Image (spheres, grey):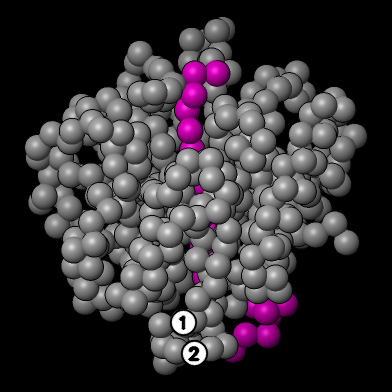
């Protein structure tokens, strides 16, 4: 456990030197995005405690909690409903409320809800999901009770550490399920998005993010439609674009900042992959967290100081005699193999995911960003 603690101290303090030399009139902010939080039936079964008749997902986030809880704003894609029992996985998800409770306890304070599974259980399921998130104090955006709810809460505005941030969230669809009036699910529609961006800009945010549920499932390279929409969003005033839905990590590309500053290109993250799921095939058994470190000075000039990614592998099996779906940073595992005691097969799967992810991202914009924590 001491090795784990040392690893996370390094993780949390990796940018400390920049903070120590900062001027007193400069504020800093760390924002991180994780991918798809899924709830397949084997995950529900693993979280069930037959001795108490309750569900507990704390172990899923056990190895990431020290890092995630250090982030100022931690955002994920909640790709299930919290529609209540009977709990089911694919194709129409309803997970126990305990999943959201564990996510919050691990460090998530914002969840995007616009995705193709957000209306799996219809009006009651979507509305109950929003009510449960509200009861837990989890900020959310992307789906709404009605137009009045959307008008008063969207775009999502968050103020933190002297920054004013705006967040947008949209999905390509809802798997053919019609959304009942007066509910609203934010769908990708250029006219609506452009108006939302204009509304967001009227609130004078320092940074505007768009989190899109888009692309083709299981394709490791973004398609032309994603690239076109990302370019439009940037032209219309979005600062940073992040994507989910393909369930695999896609490329990260850089674009010149909207102010034309060639020294300040920004990353377009096309797909973060799975954060936690029961998808076990190659490339699907994990994803990345991307972290943005910003500074802002007394003139309100914002600078992206660092952009990093952290690979996260999903291990399905026993650790300390507990069977669960564990999200594990490969670097933590590689530094503490003896404490995890994986089988040779599990060790090879984790290493394969890690190598695949690093090589895939290195191909795109080498030297533009770097893995958060390296072996050497």
Foreground pick, 338 / 210: 210
How many marks are shown on the rendered structure? Answer: 2
* Quadrant of the rendering where the N terminus is positioned: top right
Foreground pick, 67 / 36: 36
Foreground pick, 136 / 171: 171
The residue labelled by disc 2 is: 261
Q: Which residues are magenta?
A: 16-42
The picture quadrant where one finds residue 344 is: top right
* Residue 97 covered by magenta stretch: no
Give above or below for 339 relative to 74.
above
Give above or below for 34 relative to 321.
below
Question: Is label 2 in contact with label 1 (beta carbons under 8 Å)?
Answer: yes
Q: Residue at x 72, y 77 (%)?
A: 17
| Res 106 label | none
The residue labelled by disc 1 is: 257
Instruction: Judge whether residue 222 can be spotted in this image.
Output: yes
Give how far across and how far down residue 324 sits, in percent.
64, 24
Give how far across and how far down residue 256 sits, in percent.
49, 81
């Amino acid at each position: 456990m001491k090795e784990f603690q040392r690893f996370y101290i390094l993780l949390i303090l990796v940018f400390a030197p920049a903070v120590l030399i900062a001027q007193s009139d400069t504020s800093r902010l760390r924002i991180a995005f994780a991918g798809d939080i899924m709830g397949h039936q084997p995950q529900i079964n693993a979280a069930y405690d037959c001795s108490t008749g309750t569900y507990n997902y704390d172990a899923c986030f056990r190895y990431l909690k020290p890092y995630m809880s250090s982030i100022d704003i931690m955002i994920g894609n909640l790709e299930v409903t919290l529609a209540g029992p009977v709990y089911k996985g694919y194709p129409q998800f309803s997970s126990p409320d305990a999943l959201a409770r564990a996510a919050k306890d691990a460090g998530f304070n914002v969840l995007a809800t616009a995705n193709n599974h957000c209306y799996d259980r219809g009006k009651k399921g979507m509305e109950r999901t929003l009510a449960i998130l509200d009861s837990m104090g989890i900020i959310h955006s992307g789906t709404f009770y009605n137009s009045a709810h959307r008008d008063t809460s969207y775009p999502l505005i968050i103020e933190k550490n002297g920054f004013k941030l705006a967040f947008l969230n949209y999905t390509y669809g809802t798997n053919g399920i019609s959304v009942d009036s007066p509910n609203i699910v934010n769908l990708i529609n250029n006219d609506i998005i452009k108006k939302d961006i204009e509304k967001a800009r009227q609130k004078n945010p320092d940074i505007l993010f768009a989190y899109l549920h888009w692309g083709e499932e299981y394709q490791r390279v973004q398609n032309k439609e994603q690239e076109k929409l990302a370019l439009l969003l940037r032209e219309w005033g979005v600062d940073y674009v992040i994507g989910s839905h393909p369930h695999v990590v896609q490329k990260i590309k850089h674009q010149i900042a909207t102010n034309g500053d060639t020294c300040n290109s920004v990353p377009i993250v096309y797909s973060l992959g799975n954060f936690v799921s029961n998808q076990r095939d190659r490339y699907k058994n994990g994803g990345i967290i991307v972290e943005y470190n910003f500074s802002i000075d007394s003139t309100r000039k914002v600078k992206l100081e660092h952009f990093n990614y952290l690979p996260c592998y999903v291990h399905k099996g026993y650790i300390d005699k507990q069977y669960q779906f564990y999200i594990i940073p490969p670097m933590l595992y590689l530094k503490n193999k003896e404490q995890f005691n994986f089988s040779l097969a599990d060790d090879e799967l984790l290493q394969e995911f890690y190598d695949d992810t690093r090589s895939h991202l290195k191909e795109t914009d080498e030297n533009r960003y770097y893995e958060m924590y390296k072996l050497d």
